[in-house]
Image (cartoon, rainbow, N blue to C red):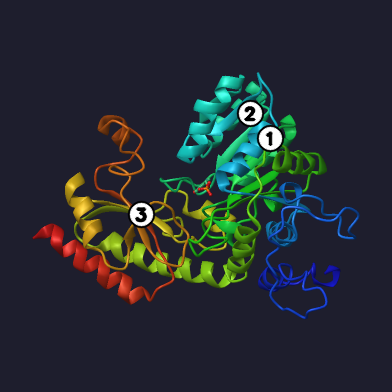
Amino acid sequence: MSSESRAGFSTRSVHESLGFGGTTGAVSPPVFLTSTFENGNPDGFDYTRSGNPNFRLIERTLASLEGGRHATSFASGVSAITAVVSSLKSGDLVLAEENIYGCTYRLFARVFAKFGLQVRYTDLSRPENWAQIEQSKPTLIWLESPTNPLLKIVDIAGVSAIAAQAGVPVLVDNTFASPYLQRPLELGATLALASTTKYVNGHSDCLGGVVATNDPAWHERMVFAQKALGLQPSPFDAWLTGRGQRTLALRMERHSANALELAGWLEKRPGVRWVRYPFLPSHPQHDLARRQMKAGSGLFIAELACSCEAALAFCRRLRCFTLAESLGGVESLICHPASMTHASVPAEVRRQVGIGDGLLRFSVGIEDVEDLRRDIDQAMEGISR
Ligand SMILES: *Cc1c(COP(=O)(O)O)cnc(C)c1O
């Protein structure tokens, strides 16, 4: 594959993930449904918890796509997060962006806090807060960009440069952008993590996670966590992820084009308070988003001028958007945080952090954009009646 290491993104996404056809000529790789391997085999496999040909194929591909030397595959995004955090020790401090994925927050607060891990939250989208890196000397910086669900943008190169001066590694959860739109390692981050369940697989048919890095010591920690904590994916899920990611570039182009068009249209439609999408000029960090990302990805949020009940009823009238958690699949989904992901948060607190009763998160799929627009339009008409 070395002659292909300089090939383009789509070429690598297709070719790096093929192999292990043996003498059969199979173009698509087989699924290696085996728990163990005969001792002394030339490929060096021993037991599937610590490696399998299907893991190796997606690890090689995702390392290449993230622009890193190494990648390690896991059973889910949460497994990948667990792998990284379990390599820290009691008393270590994580300085985290305040608007991170809920399950990451829960792992920090309900699991790793018991083992003495300290986590401090700050708004890393504001450069004036970067001084805390030098002041608190954390063991690790943890951020997402765009963030969930508010789609804030954090300047990855800016944070990474300050962190490098202080000798602090930076982890970026790259799930919302995918390596096609944004490559944190090339911007100076130490670790690029993704829930491959979302855009990388893109077909909502399995869970997976990955951590990519150029740092051999971090790579060793990830390989150790994969086998020592039993965080490995199943060979079949790894195969599905490998199959899904081959169309990542095509899908991200369509997700982004559809989302840009819908978000721009919805922003001007009566009955909508505001829309936030990184590639619309109305996004407060529009310039940074354009510098850091190749396109805006498939997610936008909109606040409808209506009650919690009316917003949920709007979601139920949609035909092309399924009311469901998750994102990044070929099919469009919609999420109503006030009654779903953030239902347990008191309404007052929700409003303070910017999650109003009428807030909706759209995960725009790859359908025909005209159908999606018509669908939203008919569901909106129901609100005014
Ligand atoms: C979904 C998600 C995760 C967790 O991934 P799973 O595959 O569901 O375990 C982590 N980070 C972000 C940003 C996510 O959207």
Label 2 or label 3, whichever lies nearer to me, is: 3
* Residue bearing the label numbered 3: 324
Query: Which residue is the extreme one toward the left?
Result: 385
Rendered location of residue 241, percent (x, y): 60, 62
Q: Is residue 277 left or right of residue 202?
A: left
Q: Is residue 84 left or right of residue 259?
A: right
At horizontal 58% and vertical 71% (from top left) the residue drawn is: 247
Q: Earlier in the sequence, mark 2 or mark 3?
A: 2
Observer-nearest residue: 201 or 134? 201
Q: Are marks 1 and 2 in contact (CB under 8 Å)?
A: yes
- Look at the image and tell me whether residue 123 can be seen: no
* Residue bearing the label numbered 2: 133
Give the class, few, some or many, for how many residues have Cα within 10 Å of label 2's Cα (few <14, many ≥20). many
Q: Earlier in the sequence, mark 1 or mark 2?
A: 2
Give the class, few, some or many, for how many residues have Cα within 10 Å of label 1's Cα (few <14, many ≥20). many
Q: Quadrant of residue 183?
A: bottom right
Q: CA distance from mark 1 to mark 2?
A: 7 Å
Rendered location of residue 29, percent (x, y): 71, 71
Observer-nearest residue: 308 or 144? 308
The secondary structure type at the circle numbered 1 is: helix
The secondary structure type at the circle numbered 3 is: loop
Q: Are marks 2 and 3 in contact (CB under 8 Å)?
A: no
Q: CA distance from mark 3 to mark 1?
A: 37 Å
* Residue bearing the label numbered 1: 163
Give, as a three-letter code, the residue at label 1: Ala
Observer-nearest residue: 304 or 244? 244
Q: Is 356 drawn above or below residue 303 in the view shown?
A: above
Q: Is residue 176 left or right of residue 42?
A: left
Give, as a three-letter code, the residue at label 3: Ala
Q: Earlier in the sequence, mark 3 or mark 1?
A: 1
